[in-house]
Amino acid sequence: MSKNKLLLVDGSSIAFRAFFAIQNIESFKSKSGLYTNAIYGFHTMLSNIIKEVKPTHLLVAFDAGKTTFRTEMFSEYKGGREKIVPEFREQLPFIKEMLKYQGIHTYELVNYEADDIIGTLARSAEAEGFSVEIFSGDRDLTQLATKETTVQITRKGVNNLETFTPNYMEEKLGITPLQLIDLKALMGDSSDNIPGVTKIGEKTGLKLITSYGTLENLYENIDELKPSKMKENLVNEKEIAFLSKQLATIDVNAPVELAVDDLARIPVDTNRLRKFYEQMNFRKFLEAELGEVKVKLEAIDFEVLDTYQAGLITADDFLYLQTLTDNYHQAEVIGVAFGNQNKIYVSKGDNLLHQAAFAKDVTEKIKKTYDFKQLKILLARFDILLDDLAFDSLLAKYILNAETSHEINLIAENYTSVAIESDVAVFGKGAKLAVPADEILCTHLARKIQVLVESEEKMKQALVAHQQLDLLLEIEQPLANVLAKMEMRGIKVDT
């Protein structure tokens, strides 16, 4: 029978590390405008450690607030820390909400730090025969390392960890995990505002602790030290040294109202987690963990064309060309769709693109599409010219929210009542990428036109409300035309 394994996570520390690990925070926003970089980074870091550790039991501990028994002992404890920025603070409740839906226990204890919760549960779990893994960004927790407890500390970025065991600490610092407390008592800790003894740094502190073992033994033999300024400081600041030791010591007997058995993994709340990921625009997590959700599709009216009749296209129509792969300079066109709120037409393959009547009507009448740059280049491959543009749904979506995906199914979610599957659900991906049956292909393309038609007015209203319509019409759309011409002309390279 495999041994039970408890993973204890320092939630406050990991959330803080996650926030600063992802610098481009403007690229991480929810649909409501909430910054999500700390939530995203926290999820990534926690997922990685869970995959590595494979715990049977799991808890994420959080600090309950600034006031603890340590601040009662020393009011300046952690007093030098900068205020938490609002962009980080606003994400913390959502990290806890996400953990709840993931089936992960969280806990905080008034008057104590997350460290104390972790220390107490680690020792309880060891006594019950568990192996324990601790995950934090705070090296203070390395004092908890034992034969049964390993401490993983984040170093840089999201995935770079340093593993602390008693043997590793002996090799790295020449001291035991518990002696780290004595070292901090002497040298202090600026990050927690633990004072320590004046003028004693890490090098001197290590020398004293390796010689005398503990702070208590050092002071019992203080007379052995040669007269010096260091000895004078030690004698004068004895109370500060022992206060510093108390501040640096993790309480492994905190009044935690949880038993280790309470921390067994519980089932994921799939529906609420899916909604949470959608709200946060975490498409990557949504697909990787929960898979594509089956969309309830409604019937749609459209006409399938093999031969184009002049005049079918109107000035109010959207035009969309479907390719199977992304390189529109070379990709085969597998379907054509156009239409408005009254009528939608679909044709499989590139049949219509070879017909003169279709080319003439497209050139003269089409002003609306999704991704004008791609459309212009695709049409140019069939000698069909497109130079004017009234509305590009992709660019409109980009302006309204540059940080999220701009796929048509997401435009449908945000700006219409149309249910439509994603391209991945219809065409597959990777080795499974393929053209579906004719009926599935044509129906999917018809729905895309329906989405583009229904979303146009709502997206325009949103652009007007944000004073961004001129940005679309006068800058982004004309620029797309220029970029398309640049791509078609290419760049001459002297190989």
Image (cartoon, helix red, strand yellow):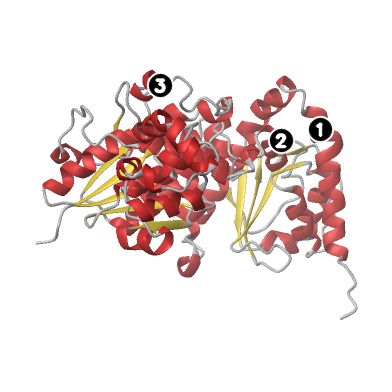
Toward the viewer: 106 or 257? 257
Q: Where does label 1 land, which residue?
A: 471
As helix, strand or loop, the secondary structure at mark 1 comes to helix
Q: Where does label 2 land, which residue?
A: 399
Q: What amino acid is found at the position of numbered circle 1 in the picture?
A: Leu
Residue 382 relative to residue 49: left or right: right
Q: Is residue 429 above or below residue 225?
A: below
Q: Where does label 3 land, which residue?
A: 71
* Marks 3, 1: nearer the viewer: 3
Q: What amino acid is found at the position of numbered circle 2 in the picture?
A: Ile
Report which quarter residue 174 is drawn in: bottom left
Residue 57 relative to residue 79: left or right: left
Q: Is residue 233 above or below residue 482?
A: above
Query: Who's the residue at 54% across and 31% down the image?
Result: 88
Q: How many marks?
A: 3
Toward the viewer: 434 or 231? 231
Give percent across and percent down for residue 380.
81, 61
Disc with the residue nearer the chain's start (2 vs 3): 3
